[in-house]
Image (cartoon, rainbow, N blue to C red):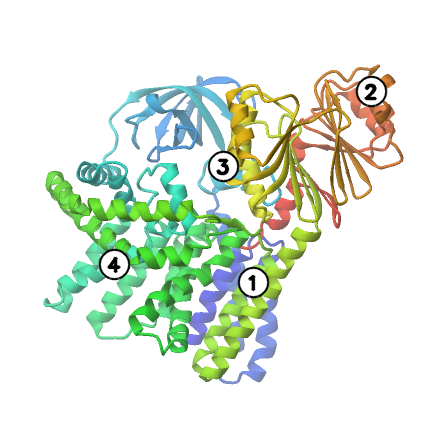
Amino acid sequence: MSRTSGVLLCLAYIVGLLLVPLPGGSYGMLVLGAIAALTLPRYWRMGPKSGIWLLVGIVGFLASFYFHVRTPQPPGIDLSAWMGQPVTVQGKVLSEPRLTRSQRIQFKLNVIQIEDQPVQINAYTTAPLLQATGLHPGYQVEVRGRLYEPQLATIPGGFNFRHYLARQGMFIGLSAETLKFESNQASWGLWWVRQRIVRSLVQGLDVPQGIVIGSMVLGRRAVDLPFDIRDKFIQVGLAHVLAASGFHVSLLLGLVLTLTQELSKRIQFRAGVTILILYSALTGFTPSVLRASLMGFGVVLGKLLDRRVNILGSLLLTATLLLLVNPLWIQDLGFQLSFLATLGLVVTVPVLMELWDYVPPAIASGLAVPISAFLWTFPLQLYHFGVLPPYGTSVNLVTLLLVVVLTLGGMVSAYVALIWPFLGSLVSSVLYYPTVAFLAIIDGFTELPGNSVAVGKISVVQLLVLYGVFALFWLKDRIGIKAKKMLLGMAISLAIAVVVIPLWYSQQYLSQVTVFATRTPTVAIQDRGKVVLVNTPDFGVAQYTLIPFFQSQGVNQLDAGIMLTREERAIQGWLGILDTLPIRRFYQIGNPTTQVERKIEAQVKTYQTLQVNQGLKWKTLSIKGLSLEPQVLEVQLEHQRWLMLKGRGFTENFCAVQSWCSSQGKPTVLIWSGKGLAVEVIEKIQPKVAISLSEDLDPAILSALRATNTQVFLTGRDGAIQWNSQRGFSTTSNSQSQNDFAF
C-alpha cells in the first residue's frame, strides 16, 4: 500500500469519528467513498485506485460504528425509587479524589450496593472535605447521601455535565452527607508516587510554590492545584504550562538525549523510551502526553535507525493509533488542542521564520513558536469558550525562560525525590525565588485591565473556515515570498470577514431575551449592544451559568443589573458577577441596609432604588417596576411585552386594582415560578407565551393557558428559554442538539 493510501485511510478514520454526532454522517462517508471511487481515478491517474477509495468510505463508516461500541452505556437498572431520597451506598473508590470549587471532595465511585440491593454502576460522588481526607483509589467506603441525575446544559450551547460524565462511564451523581471507610487497604498505585514527589516539592518550596512546580511537572490533573492560582494561569494564557503536554515531554526527552549523547545509540534509545513510559504513567496517561510520547518514540527510533522522521506523517499516525485505543478521545479538548498546537508549529513556524528573515533567529523563533501555537488553537477556544487572553503571547514570551528553567528544575527535583525525598526537597529549594518571580509576573498580568476579553463563541462554519484559511500555509513550498505575504494578508482579511464582522454585527444589532432555569426569575436582556441582567439567585448560578453565558455572547460589561431578591445568597451572586463583569447602573428594591449590599454599591457607577412605575430606557428597550409586593417587572422590547412575577400574592382579586394586567394590545410573555398564580390573573393577562420556572404545572393553570392558545415552556423540562428577534423562541434542549456536532 502506498503512502498516499495510508494517509487517506488514517484521515478517513479520524473524519469518521468527527462525523459521529452528525445524523447520517457515517452513511455519508460510504456515499463519498463510492463517488470518489467512480470519479477520482479518471482525473488523478497516478493516485489511489477505485478500491482504495471504496476502502476509505468503509473505514469512515466503521469508525462511527466503533465509536458507538466503545461508548459507555448505562446499566439496565431502575434507580428512580432512590433518586432524591436519603440512601446508604457501598462501593469502591476508582479515581484519585480531587477538591471542587465548593470545597468538597469529588471522586469516581463504583457502587455495588444501594441500601440492601446489589447494583453495579459508577457514580460521580462528592463528599465533605474533612470526612474524605485521606481517601485513595481502592478504598471500600460506605456513603450516606442522596442520588441525583447529572444536569444537562442549562443554557444554549452550555456545558453538558451529564454527557461529560457519561463519556467517563458515570451515569448518576451522589451527594454524600457522611462517608465511612470500610477498608483502608488501598491498592498501591502511581498516586502514591505522585504524592511522594509533591510532598517533597512542597517541603522544599513551601505553599503555593511547591504545588505550582508539582503541577508544572506532573500536570494539573495529577496535582490538586488551588482554583485561584489555576484561574490566574488561564486568564493570562498560561494554562498549557500547568497541563502536562508535548512541551514537557520535549524538554524531558531533550534533557535525556543530551545527557546520553556520548553513549551508544542503543543506550540512548532505551533511556529515551524508559523516560517516556515513566513520565506518561506519572501524568496519568493523559491524551496530550501520550501524543507527545508516541512522537518522541518516533524521534528516538529514528536516531537508532539513522532515519529522518516525517513530522506530519508521525503526527497523523499518532492520532490514528491513539484514537484506535480510545475513540472517545476525539471529543477530549486537551487531545484536540495538543494536536492542533503541534500541527501549527510544524506548518506555520517555517513560514513565519522565512517572513522574518531580517530578524535575529533566536528572537524570530521565540516569536514564531507561541504565535503559531496561538493561531492554531484560538479558533477552537473561541468555539468552546468565546474568551481570549489579549496578553497571552506577551506573557508567554516574557516567561519563556522561567518556564523552561522551572520545568526542567522541577523534573530533576522530582526524579531525586523518588529516590530520596529529603534530598529532592533540597534540590527544589533552589527554585524558590524563580518561582516567586514567575508567580509575581502572572499576578502583574492579571491586574492589567482587559486581561481576559469575551469576544463570543463562533459557529461550526466559522470554525471550519478559519482552519481552512490556516491550511493554506501548506502552500508555503510552492509559492514565492511575495505570494506568501499576499497569502498571509488574504488569510487575515478572510478571518476578519468570517469571524470579527459577524460577532460585531450580532452584538450591535441583536435583540435577545434569555430566561434561565432558576428558582426565581433570572433574565438576560440584550438589545443592540445594551445588556441588562434581571436578578441572580445565588453565587453558584452566577459563577457556572450567568458568567459563562455572557462570555459566550461576547459581553464584557452589563449596562444595568436589577436585583429582585435581597437574600444573602442572591447578594453573593451579584458580588460574583461584579468580580468578572462591571455593572454601570444597579437597581434594587429598597435602600442598601447590610454591609454586603454596600459592597455592591461601592463597585458600581450608579446605584439606585427601583420604585413603582419608574421607567428605564435604552433605545428600543424599556423596563418598569409595576408592583413591589408581590414583585412585577415589565420589559418592552421589539413590540413585545414581558411580565416577570415574583412572589405568591397573585390571587384571584389581584388584577381587580391593577391596570397593567390587561394585554394592552401587545403580545405578552409571562414569566413566573409556576406556583402562587390564580387562574383569574392568567385570564386577565391573556399571555401569548407562558414560561414557568418549574418541571410541571397545576392542571387548572395548564387548562387556563390552553384555553387562550398560550404557548407554554417549562424550564425544569426545557432548560433555559431564549427568544431572538430573528429566530423566535427556542429551548436549550433544541439548541444543544444543534450544537453537538464539531469536535
Q: Nearer the viewer, mark 1 or mark 3?
A: 3
**Residue 298 in view here:** yes
Which percent across, then down, holds residue 225? 33, 39
Which structural element holds mark 2?
helix
Identify residue type, mark 3. Answer: Asp
Discs 2, 3 touching: Cβ within 8 Å? no
**Residue 1 in view here:** no
At a point 37% along the width and 26% down the height, the residue shown is 91
Answer few, some or many: residues within 10 Å of disc 2's Cα (few below 14, many 20 plus, some between 14 and 19): some
Residue 492 placement: quadrant: bottom right
- Dividing the image into 4 quarters, which one contains the N terminus? bottom left
Identify residue type, mark 2. Answer: Val
Q: Which is nearer the N-term, disc 1 or disc 2? A: 1
Q: Which is nearer the N-term, disc 2 or disc 4? A: 4
Write down the residue under mark 3: 579
Q: Which is nearer the N-term, disc 1 or disc 3? A: 1
Query: Cα distance, mark 1 to mark 3?
Result: 34 Å
Answer few, some or many: residues within 10 Å of disc 1's Cα (few below 14, many 20 plus, some between 14 and 19): some
Q: Which is nearer the N-term, disc 2 or disc 3? A: 3
Write down the residue under mark 4: 251
Nearer-the-camera pick, 308 or 546: 546
Write down the residue under mark 2: 679
